[in-house]
Image (cartoon, rainbow, N blue to C red):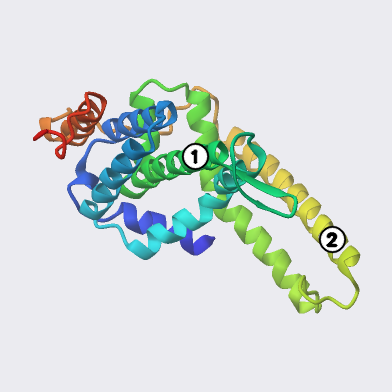
């Protein structure tokens, strides 16, 4: 986890055309992609948008192994819901085995959810990989996002490292005492009890440390009106809008159904 968070910072520090795009434009672009993907019902159009995003990742010089790790980390959360659709959605049964039935409507809807998931995740990965956390927070501030939301997001991301460090210490202490979650002779009930104790200990330590940090911030004069996110005054250029204009043109072509392979019909 710590290595992946560090790799995100390394990818955001690369030099490419997309890394020079203003963060405000990137945020609006990602929101536009997500909204379009959520409202879309044609899986072919979603695949074309996904190909467009993958091309942007290639232009940004992002490491393929890094991208696979990001997809593998996020995919299980929404992928399970999409995979279950053929079994739980009613419709025409196309395959049956024992008590399981796969329906055509469920399969089509599951593939549509999967395509939407990939497009939305790809857009978020592209944003976080070409813009650092300070740049994203600065861009949100320039877009007049409420300060409370920006502060909460900043604290949450920054303390992921500390959260992981506390978890790593607990796991190291357990291993030093011979505790193993796999093939434990004491049985699964003992393992579950220790995992529950570890989670509660981690929560208490995180809460206590958060209280201490907030007290230290107040002692140094912090208030909700404190402006600690510095924004660089930068005027938007024509090149900043190239990515957004390219996406808008692609969406326009898709919606009027004048794709390159249909232009000659």
Q: Quadrant of residue 48?
A: top left
Q: Is residue 210 above or below residue 241?
A: below
Mark 1 Cα-neighbour bin, 10 Å: few <14, some 14–19, many ≥20: some
Q: How many marks?
A: 2
Give the percent coordinates (x, y) of residue 190. Answer: 90, 66
Q: In front: 185, or 154? A: 185
Q: Quadrant of residue 115?
A: top left
At 87% from the left and 60% from the top, the residue drawn is 193
Distance from disc 1 to disc 2, alpha carbons, whole Å, reads 38 Å
Q: Is residue 84 left or right of residue 23?
A: right
At 67% from the left and 60% from the top, the residue drawn is 167
Q: Is residue 67 above or below residue 133?
A: below
Give the percent coordinates (x, y) of residue 142. Answer: 33, 25
Mark 1 residue element: helix
Quadrant in which the C terminus appears: top left
Give the percent coordinates (x, y) of residue 11. Answer: 33, 56
Quickly name the residue at label 1.
108
Q: Is residue 153 left or right of residue 232?
A: right
Residue 226 visible in the current orientation = yes
Quadrant in which the N terminus appears: bottom right
Q: In front: 131, or 127? A: 127
Q: Quadrant of residue 61?
A: bottom left
Q: Is residue 119 above or below residue 162?
A: above
Give the percent coordinates (x, y) of residue 199. Answer: 77, 54
Q: In front: 123, or 225? A: 123
Q: Which mark is residue 87?
A: none
Q: Earlier in the sequence, mark 1 or mark 2?
A: 1
Q: In front: 178, or 74? A: 74
- Label 1 or label 2, whichever lies nearer to me, is 1
Residue 230 visible in the current orientation = no
Q: Which mark is residue 192?
A: 2
């Amino acid at each position: 986890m710590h290595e992946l968070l560090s790799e995100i910072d390394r990818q955001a520090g690369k030099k490419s055309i997309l890394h020079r795009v203003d963060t405000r434009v990137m945020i609006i672009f990602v929101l536009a992609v997500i909204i379009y993907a959520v409202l879309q019902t044609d899986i072919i159009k979603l695949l074309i948008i996904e190909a467009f995003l993958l091309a942007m990742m290639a232009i940004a010089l992002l490491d393929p192994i890094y991208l696979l790790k990001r997809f593998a980390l996020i995919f299980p959360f929404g992928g399970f819901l999409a995979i279950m659709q053929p079994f739980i959605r009613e419709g025409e049964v196309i395959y049956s085995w024992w008590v399981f039935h796969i329906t055509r409507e469920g399969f089509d809807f599951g593939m549509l959810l999967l395509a939407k998931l990939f497009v939305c995740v790809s857009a978020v990965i592209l944003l976080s990989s070409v813009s650092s956390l300070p740049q994203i927070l600065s861009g949100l501030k320039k877009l007049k996002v409420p300060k409370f939301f920006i502060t909460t997001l900043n604290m949450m991301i920054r303390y992921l490292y500390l959260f992981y460090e506390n978890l790593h210490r607990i796991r190291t202490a357990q291993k030093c005492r011979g505790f193993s979650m796999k093939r434990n002779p004491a049985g699964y009930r003992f393992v579950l009890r220790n995992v529950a104790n570890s989670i509660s200990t981690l929560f208490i330590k995180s809460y206590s440390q958060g209280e201490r940090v907030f007290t230290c911030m107040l002692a140094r004069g912090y208030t909700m009106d404190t402006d600690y996110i510095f924004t660089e005054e930068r005027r938007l250029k024509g090149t900043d809008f190239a990515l957004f204009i390219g996406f808008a043109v692609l969406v326009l072509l898709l919606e009027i159904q004048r794709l390159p392979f249909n232009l000659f019909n």
